[in-house]
Image (spheres, coloured by chain):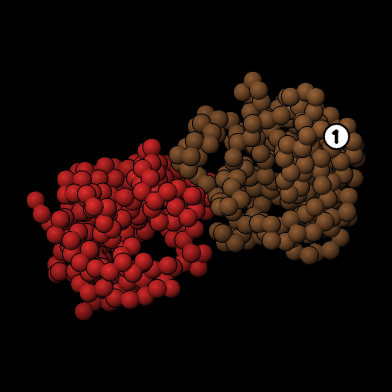
Chain colours: A brown, B red
Amino acid sequence: MQEKLYEGKAKKIFATDDPDVVLQQFKDDATAFDGTKKSSITSKGTSNARISARLFRLLEENGVATHFLEQPSEDSLLTRKLDMFAVEVVVRNYAAGSIVKRLGFEEGQKFKQPMVEYFLKDDSLHDPLITCAHIEELGLVSKDELEQLKSLALKVNEVLGAFFAERGITLVDFKLEFGRDREGNIVLGDEISPDTCRFWDAETGKKLDKDRFRFDLGEVEEAYQEILGRVESD
Amino acid sequence: MQEKLYEGKAKKIFATDDPDVVLQQFKDDATAFDGTKKSSITSKGTSNARISARLFRLLEENGVATHFLEQPSEDSLLTRKLDMFAVEVVVRNYAAGSIVKRLGFEEGQKFKQPMVEYFLKDDSLHDPLITCAHIEELGLVSKDELEQLKSLALKVNEVLGAFFAERGITLVDFKLEFGRDREGNIVLGDEISPDTCRFWDAETGKKLDKDRFRFDLGEVEEAYQEILGRVESD
């Protein structure tokens, strides 16, 4: 086994023989509410790795550069090594989660247009909401790069939204993380899975994402499997 | 006495014979931390009314439209009646207060450029930080009006910053509230005082604003008087 470079809440990252390539191993560990709720979801690692692989491929086919290279095993991805931005980009089509509490939107309310939010990746500050002015002051990304992140996030929303709509799933919202590759290109990193997206069954409204774990809704493992099945269906 | 239209934490607003004009009476009541800390500061009403009158005059002289008409008594202002936006506009030159906790800036750190933030005026939501995307979604002001608010706020910052610098005071940050008059013009409303600005003595760094009340620093009344004296000096 190669050197472990990093272990996060949901993934371990290992070096490979190629300094520009890392191996991301997806864990079954689940955390929520700023790490205060911890457990494990059977086969989540495998589901999320396979879902991410399929969605990264889809995005690449649609002209979005991602860090994905290949899937060498059920629960891992080989990816390009990126220098990650300390910004999470969130796109919201419908109100759910933190924005409901923060701003009083009603859960399920459709936004007039997809809403893009930025959060500072900083555990000690609990990943606060930040504005363009904060991003500039903190020097997290340049003004030009921020415009790129926003338009990439909206492009991802279009591609994923259509893909999931065809599979009877409403893409409610999702979180993206971007970084720079060795040549300085902006590339989509992290994962795209029920851990980082909200998916609702388009017909029944049933939540098929990490909210089942957050709020003890039951059938947690089954939700991840359901998304995997629909994502891998043609 | 005319009909009381509204009583807030720091002011009462009365109708006058002219439907486009209201009387703002400044109270000595002081609240902080979302209303959880309450007390009274001797002569605050008078200080804040006089300080606001002087600063509104200064801004009018510099081309910023304000609601100020005249000061009929020590603790009150006659103002144009505005339809207020549900947005607070904050301008920060140095890090202090909520942004220190929220984003980890060091108190007193000078920002590369004046930072403009927006907050939703909603007590039940505790006046949360909002972004341009939220403002658009909530329909609080149009995109064009938001640009106007921002450039007006920066203009106010320039005028007040220079005025206070001449009087040995550092303008750390401040909060503005705007509204529309009957003709639809954007006009600066509310007050400009040690309740809504952070003022630090430029030499000693001594806080001369509501933070003395918030954090029980003593000499609260004296700080308001000190600002009044410097504001009214030529």
Determine whether the residue tagged by mark 1 lies in a helix, strand or loop.
loop
Q: Where is the C terminus of chain A found, in terms of image quarters?
A: top right
Residue B156 percent coordinates (x, y): 28, 46
The correct choice, above or below, for A148 with respect to A226 in the image is above
Judge from the rendering whether residue B15 lies leftward or rightward of residue A138; answer left or right. left
Number of marks in the image?
1
Kindly identify the amino acid type of the residue bearing the numbered disc 1: Met
Residue at 39% in and 51% down: B107
Q: Chain of mark 1?
A: A
Query: Which residue is depicted at the point 43% across and 73% down?
Result: B36
The residue singled out by tag 1 in the image is A1
- Residue A184 in the image, given as x and y percentages of width and height: 61, 23
Most extreme residue toward the top, as rendered? A183
Q: How would you rate the neighbour count of disc 1 (Cα within 10 Å): few for under 14, some for 14-19, many for 20 or more? A: few
Where residue A206 sits, quadrant-wise, is bottom right
- On screen, residue B210 versus residue B45, left or right, reads right
